[in-house]
Amino acid sequence: MEYENQITILSDYLEEFPETHEPVWILGRQHHLNTDKSKLLLDISARLWFTYRRKFSPIGGTGPSSDAGWGCMLRCGQMMLAQALICRHLGRDWQWEKHKKQPEEYHRILRCFLDRKDCCYSIHQMAQMGVGEGKSIGEWFGPNTVAQVLKKLALFDEWNSLAVYVSMDNTVVIEDIKKMCWSPPQSSSAAHSSAHLHRSALGRNKNAAGFCTGWKPLLLIIPLRLGINHINPVYIDAFKECFKMPQSLGALGGKPNNAYYFIGFLGNELIYLDPHTTQSFVDSEENGTVDDQSFHCQQAPHRMKIMNLDPSVALGFFCKEECDFDNWCSLVQKEILKQQSLRMFELVQKHPPHWPPFIPPTKPEVTTTGAELIESTDKLFELEEEFEILSV
C-alpha cells in the first residue's frame, strides 16, 4: 500500500511534463510518459541527490561549515560518482523506496559522501584536494577540476577500487585505459605488463606479488568545451546520444557559477538534479545506517533547453567490466564519431607519440588524509602538469 501511495504522490509531480510521445532518456534507460510515468519518477528519485549542507564541522578545522554558494559543482561531482558506485554495487536497475530497508552496500556508499573529514568523498576531502588544483577552499570549481579531484581521491578508496580516467585534449586513449584498468595494485610496471599479457581466459590471475589482477571498474570522465560562449548546435545530437548509452553517468555542467547534474533529456530539454538547496548536516547512526530521506529528490525534475547550457561540460561513463568498455567504444564509433564535421571528442587506439608517457597513478604511501594528503599526491601528477604546459 505504501508503495502504491508513493507512486501516486510521484505521479502528481509529473504534471509539469508535456504531453508527448517522445521517449524520455535517463542514464541509459528509456521511459515513455504516456505509459510509465510513475516508473520514470521512481527512476529519477532513486539517484542519490547531494545538495548544499550547513552545520558540518569546519573544513580544515577553521574553514567554512557550509558550502552554500560555492559547492554546487562539488555536489554534482559527488552525484556522478555516487551513480557509478550504485551501478558497481547495486546495479543500474536498483530502485529506492522511502522507508524500505536497503542493503548494507547502499548505506556504505552513502557514508562515503557524508560531510565529515574522514569520509573519502566528503565536501571536506574534495575542497581540500582542490587546493592542489589551484582552487582555494570556498572557491567555485569547474567540471574539469572536479574530475581531477575525484581521480586523486579515488586512489585512497580501497573498497570501491575504481580506475578513474579523465581524458585530456578531448581524446580518449583505449590503450591507456586498458593499461590502467588491468594494472594490479602497487605492482611494478614489469609485473603489470606480464599480468596484462598473460591474464587467463577468465580475466583473472595473480601477478608475482600475489595480487588479483581483474579489471578495475572504470569511471571515465570526458571534460569538453562544446562552443565558445554558447553550445554549438552541431554537438547537440551527439551530446544527447551519450545519455542513451547503458554506461551513461550523465554530465556535469550548467550555467556560469551554477552547476547541475544532468541525467537525461526529453526532446531538446535536458533533465537535471539541482544541488542549490541548503539542508542540514546528516551523520550516520550508531548502527551505520544513514537517514537517507534528504538524499533523494522527490520533486519534479528540473528541465532546461540544451541551447541554454554553458559549453563547458564533463561527460561521465561507468564500465564495470572490460566488455562494458568495449561496448562503449563500439557505440562511440557508431553514434559519436560518425559525424564527419566537428566531433565532440576523439577515441584513439594508441597513446599519441607526442604525449608524455602514460603511467597509471598509484596510491602514495601515506597514512593521512586531507590537506597533508594533497602534498603527498602532488608528485603523482607532475607528469600531467608537464603535459598541460606542453600542450598550451
Image (cartoon, helix red, strand yellow):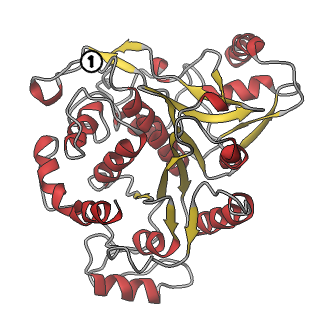
- 28 vs 298: above or below: below
- Left or right of 333 in this view: 121: left
- 68 vs 81: above or below: above
- 126 vs 269: above or below: below
In the rendered image, the quadrant that contains the N terminus is top right
Residue tagged 1: 66
Observer-nearest of 165 and 168: 168
Observer-nearest of 181 and 239: 239
- Figure quadrant of residue 115: top left
Q: Disc 1 residue type? A: Ser
In the rendered image, the quadrant that contains the C terminus is bottom left
- Figure quadrant of residue 328: bottom right
Observer-nearest of 12 and 1: 12
Residue 261 seen in the current view: yes
- Left or right of 311 in this view: 158: left
Residue lying at 29% horizontally and 49% vertically, measured from the top left = 153
Give the x, y percent position of residue 185: 30, 69
Residue lying at 13% horizontally and 30% vertically, measured from the top left = 60
Give the x, y percent position of residue 84: 50, 46
Give the x, y percent position of residue 211: 32, 75
Residue lying at 57% horizontally and 64% vertically, measured from the top left = 346
Residue 243 seen in the current view: no
Count of marks placed on residues: 1
Secondary structure of the residue carrying tag 1 is loop
Give the x, y percent position of residue 219: 47, 54
Q: Check disc 1: other Cα within 10 Å, few if <14, some if 14-19, many if 20+.
A: many
- Figure quadrant of residue 384: bottom left
